[in-house]
Amino acid sequence: MGQETSVSRFTDIEIKVLSILRENSRASVSEIAERLGVSRVTVYRALKSLVNKGVRFTVDIPEDSPRAFVVSRESHADLGECFKLVDGRYMVIVRARDFNELVNIIDRLRDKEEVYIALRPVSKQLISVGLVCDYCGGPITVPIIYRRGRRTYYLCCETCLRELKKKLRKSNKNKVNAS
Ligand SMILES: [Zn+2]
């Protein structure tokens, strides 16, 4: 949050929203609206206005939270990571803590043209699996590295190494026979 902004610049509702967020930075827009007895739109407006006044929120969103890829005519860099597309439109990656919040945010975008809702990131999980054995496909704790020609193979155990060598020898023979 911006420390140099003086409190007097904020409206009543903005100060109330801020104090709830100070208590609980994970409070959803619906929760804040309910606690203050105002509409969600009012809370959104207050949040947007706070951002315009220089307040920076550290958004605490888990990695596997729902997200949407929204293509629109206008840039929406305030909502998330925003890209300019080659066709002149923009794509913003909107993230939220739950589907309700995600749908609420998307609903407010009047100029949206395409919306893709993602369930979860896939590539990240694949990377976290780490090295995979080139023979059996299983995970590797300590890799056995085997270089053959220009290729490097990673194996999980001696058995896989032996079997891989056998397989390579066979396929080499086949290649020789075929040519
Ligand atoms: Zn293996």
Image: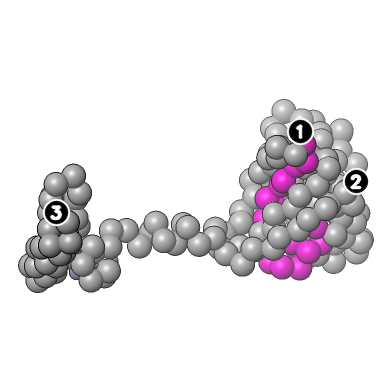
On the image, which quarter does residue 87 sit in? top right
User: Residue 57: percent from the left, percent from the top?
Assistant: 69, 44
Residue 56 visible in image = no
At 69% across and 66% down in the image, what residue appears? 98
* Render colour scheme: one colour
Side of 56 where 141 appears, left or right: left
- Ligand 1 image position (quadrant): bottom left
Q: Which mark is on residue 54?
A: 1
Q: Is ligand 1 closer than 8 angstroms to the Cβ of mark 2?
A: no
At 21% across and 67% down in the image, what residue appears? 135
Q: Which mark is on residue 145?
A: 3
Q: Is mark 1 on a helix, strand or loop?
A: loop
| Residue at far front of view | 179
Structural crowding at the residue carrying mark 3, measured as other residues with C-alpha within 10 Å and reported as few (<14), some (14–19) or many (≥20): few
Which residues are drawn in magenta?
A: 88-106
Side of 32 where 155 appears, left or right: left
Frontmost of labels 1 and 3 is 3
Q: Is residue 161 positioned above or below 84 on the image?
A: below
Which of the two residues, 158 or 94, is positioned nearer the viewer here?
Answer: 158
- Residue bearing mark 2: 12
Q: Distance between the residues labelled 2 and 3?
A: 65 Å
User: Residue 61: percent from the left, percent from the top?
Assistant: 61, 56
Side of 40 where 142 appears, left or right: left
User: Residue 40: percent from the left, percent from the top?
Assistant: 87, 60
> Disc 2 marks which amino acid?
Asp
Q: Are marks 1 and 3 in contact (CB under 8 Å)?
A: no
Structural crowding at the residue carrying mark 2, measured as other residues with C-alpha within 10 Å and reported as few (<14), some (14–19) or many (≥20): few
> Disc 3 marks which amino acid?
Ile
Q: Mark 1 or mark 2: name the one nearer the start of the chain.
A: 2
Q: How many labels does the image show?
A: 3
